[in-house]
């Protein structure tokens, strides 16, 4: 990877991935592709080039690929699961139409492509505990339908046209830099904001709702490592299960209380998010990622909680809490 285009560059993953890629590949160019409604700001804007790239417009993708001699595209444009249910046509246009545009540009111009899939690519008939790498994928959300379609289309382009497509199935991602917005797993980010602000958290999911989650530094490392992996070792491509922790609202709340004993949580259920979460796995089996490209998570719930609280206090200018138990 030398010259990289990140489409969806100002979103939750993109805004942090771009900074990581710019640090990792100082000799190359990492272009932040954004839509006018979400322009880059601050360090993201100042540290490298940014171009308008609407994934539904193949000419815009091709023009930026030509201009910067792009060899790798990170396609991070998507509507998250809950918001996608409100706008299924747009979710398909971005998730599948946009991926098709990206793959066609990649085929013509010889780029590698990373497109994340998700735990949302599974559905109610999937085994829910330690979900295997290769198993039933019959999601009942439009988000999941776009993710399974994306996995298949990406594998097709690899086999049929030799496009170097690779991917991981992200769990819920937790970070303090950019808010996710519109996902089913967002509560696991919002809960930390409420905790450090000393507000009562209104949890949209009921106790016992287990889902896989991951701290952003691990997710970013996975996105880089899969693209750097030795292709001869890859049996799978689109997409690898990756995992680091699985918890329900009670477990994360209890962990936060170890550091913020007065933290309060109440339940105010969101039926849409609850139904989506109930259809997703409780935990994934990531053996294939571990064996084929050496995937290893570094953050568990405790390490993530300490880091989230410390960094959110700093970001929100709240006196940094003492984190000794
Ligand atoms: C969502 O909740 O929609 C996403 C995901 C798990 O893909 N965070």
Image (spheres, rainbow, N blue to C red):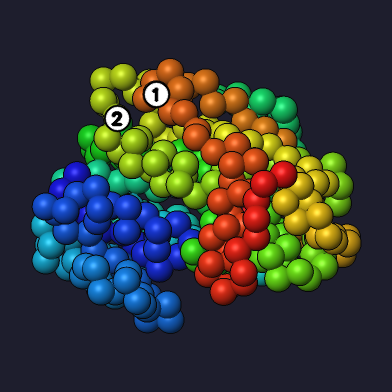
Indicate the position of residue 17 as horizontal and vertical percent values: 37, 55
- Would you identify the image quadrant in which residue 322 lies? bottom right
Between residues 39 and 46, which one lies in front from this camera angle?
Answer: 46
Cα distance in 3D space between marks 1 and 2: 9 Å
Q: Tell me the quadrant of the picture where the C terminus can be found.
A: top right
Residue drawn at point x = 37 percent, y = 25 percent: 293
Residue drawn at point x = 62 percent, y = 31 percent: 284
Residue annotated with mark 1? 294
Which is closer to the viewer, label 1 or label 2?
A: 1
Indicate the position of residue 319 as horizontal and vertical percent values: 62, 69
Q: Residues within 10 Å of mark 1 (few under 14, many from 20)?
A: few
Residue drawn at point x = 34 percent, y = 76 percent: 42
Q: Marks 2 and 1: in contact by CB < 8 Å?
A: yes
Sequence order check: which comes first, mark 1 or mark 2? 2
Is the CB–ligand 1 distance for label 2 below 8 Å?
Answer: no
Circle 2 SS class: loop
Residue annotated with mark 2? 229
């Amino acid at each position: 990877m030398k010259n990289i285009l990140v489409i969806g560059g100002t979103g939750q993953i993109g805004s942090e991935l771009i900074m990581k890629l710019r640090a990792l590949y100082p000799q190359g160019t990492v272009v932040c592709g954004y839509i006018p409604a979400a322009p880059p700001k601050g360090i993201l804007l100042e540290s490298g080039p940014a171009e308008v790239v609407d994934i539904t417009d193949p000419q815009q993708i091709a023009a930026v690929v030509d201009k910067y001699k792009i060899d790798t595209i990170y396609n991070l444009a998507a509507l998250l699961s809950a918001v996608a249910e409100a706008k299924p046509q747009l979710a398909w246009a971005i998730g599948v139409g946009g991926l098709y545009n990206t793959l066609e540009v990649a085929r013509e111009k010889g780029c590698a492509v990373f497109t994340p899939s998700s735990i949302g690519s599974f559905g109610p008939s999937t085994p829910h505990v330690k979900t295997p790498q290769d198993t039933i994928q019959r999601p009942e959300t439009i988000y999941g339908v776009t993710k399974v379609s994306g996995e298949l289309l990406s594998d097709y382009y690899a086999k049929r046209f030799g496009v170097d497509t690779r991917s991981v199935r992200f769990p819920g991602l937790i970070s303090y830099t950019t808010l996710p917005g519109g996902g089913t797993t967002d509560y696991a980010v919002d809960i930390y904001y409420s905790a450090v602000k000393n507000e009562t958290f209104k949890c949209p999911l009921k106790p016992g709702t287990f889902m896989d989650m991951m701290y952003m530094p691990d997710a970013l490392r996975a996105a880089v490592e899969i693209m750097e992996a030795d292709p001869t070792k890859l049996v799978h491509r689109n997409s690898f299960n990756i995992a680091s922790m699985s918890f329900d609202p009670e477990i994360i709340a209890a962990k936060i209380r170890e550091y913020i004993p007065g933290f309060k949580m109440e339940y105010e259920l969101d039926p849409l998010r609850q139904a989506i979460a109930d259809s997703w796995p409780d935990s994934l089996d990531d053996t294939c990622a571990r064996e084929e490209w050496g995937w290893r998570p570094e953050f568990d719930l405790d390490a993530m909680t300490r880091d989230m609280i410390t960094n959110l206090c700093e970001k929100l200018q709240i006196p940094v809490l003492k984190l000794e138990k």
